[in-house]
Image (cartoon, rainbow, N blue to C red):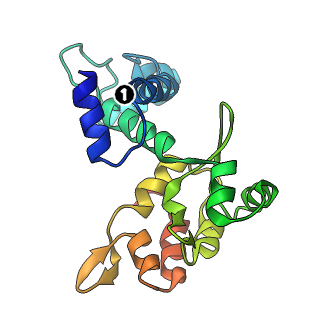
């Protein structure tokens, strides 16, 4: 199993051994929710009645059903494994680590607090620096949006961002020299119902 996992990790370009990656997976799974949560536990009796009235099923997940958390757990693990520490980000940008902390505080770099310090998602970096227009985009991110939501948005093709007649991801758009304002407008809507 670990050989197969190491092969998959290498093909994906993740520089981590299988044991460390599985530790990330375990941590992400533990943080997401308890195993087999009972959806009804999250709502008051009145809320439960209203949700049932509109046709929602609040019964616990059956053991025979696939666990829908698996994809999210894997995404969390990849996000954590591919992220940079403050020191690694400072090295990449050729600056002092205190500058990285200031950028995090000023929301000019996306980061989350993890065991062992700040972690910075790698999507915001290029081989030679920061993603063009990053500051404009990050100012528009609603403060309540978790790093995984922002990473998913940045890496998902958007119909409003077109390069060569094809929808582009916000990252591709910015790397191609696209105006960051359309990306910022889309970013402002994260977390709002469609």
Q: Is residue 15 left or right of residue 64?
A: right
Q: Is residue 43 left or right of residue 136?
A: left
Residue 7 x %, y %: 25, 36
Please, what secondary structure does the residue beneath circle 1 have?
A: helix
Q: Nearer the viewer, residue 111 or 10?
A: 10
Residue at point 63%, 51% (across, down)? 88
Q: Is residue 191 visible?
A: no
Residue 47 x %, y %: 48, 30
Q: Nearer the viewer, residue 158 or 24?
A: 24
Residue 96 x %, y %: 78, 59
Residue at point 50%, 68% (across, down)? 127
Residue 184 x %, y %: 54, 74
Estimate how packed mark 1 is, as few (under 14), some (14 to 19) or many (20 or more) residues with alpha carbons within 10 Å: some
Residue at point 43%, 60% (across, down)? 153
Residue at point 48%, 80% (across, down)? 182
Q: Nearer the viewer, residue 125 or 39?
A: 125
Residue holding disc 1:
18
Q: Is residue 89 above or below residue 80?
A: below
Q: Looking at this view, name the residue that lies furthest to the left.
A: 64
Q: Is residue 87 above or below residue 157?
A: above
């Amino acid at each position: 199993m670990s050989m197969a996992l190491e092969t998959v990790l290498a093909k994906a370009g993740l520089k981590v051994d299988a044991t460390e990656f599985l530790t990330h997976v375990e941590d992400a799974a533990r943080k997401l929710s308890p195993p087999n949560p009972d959806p009804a536990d999250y709502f008051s009796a009145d809320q439960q009645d209203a949700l049932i009235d509109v046709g929602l099923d609040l019964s616990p997940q059956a053991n025979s059903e696939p666990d829908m958390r698996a994809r999210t757990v894997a995404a969390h693990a990849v996000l954590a494994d591919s992220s940079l520490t403050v020191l690694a980000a400072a090295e990449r940008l050729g600056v002092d680590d205190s500058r990285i902390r200031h950028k995090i505080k000023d929301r000019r770099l996306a980061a989350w607090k993890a065991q062992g310090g700040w972690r910075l998602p790698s999507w915001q970096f290029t081989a030679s620096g920061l993603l063009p227009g990053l500051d404009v985009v990050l100012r528009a991110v609603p403060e309540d949006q978790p790093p995984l939501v922002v990473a998913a948005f940045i890496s998902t093709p958007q119909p409003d961002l077109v390069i060569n007649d094809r929808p582009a991801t916000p990252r591709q758009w910015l790397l191609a020299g696209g105006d960051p304002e359309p990306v910022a407008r889309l970013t402002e809507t994260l977390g709002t119902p469609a």
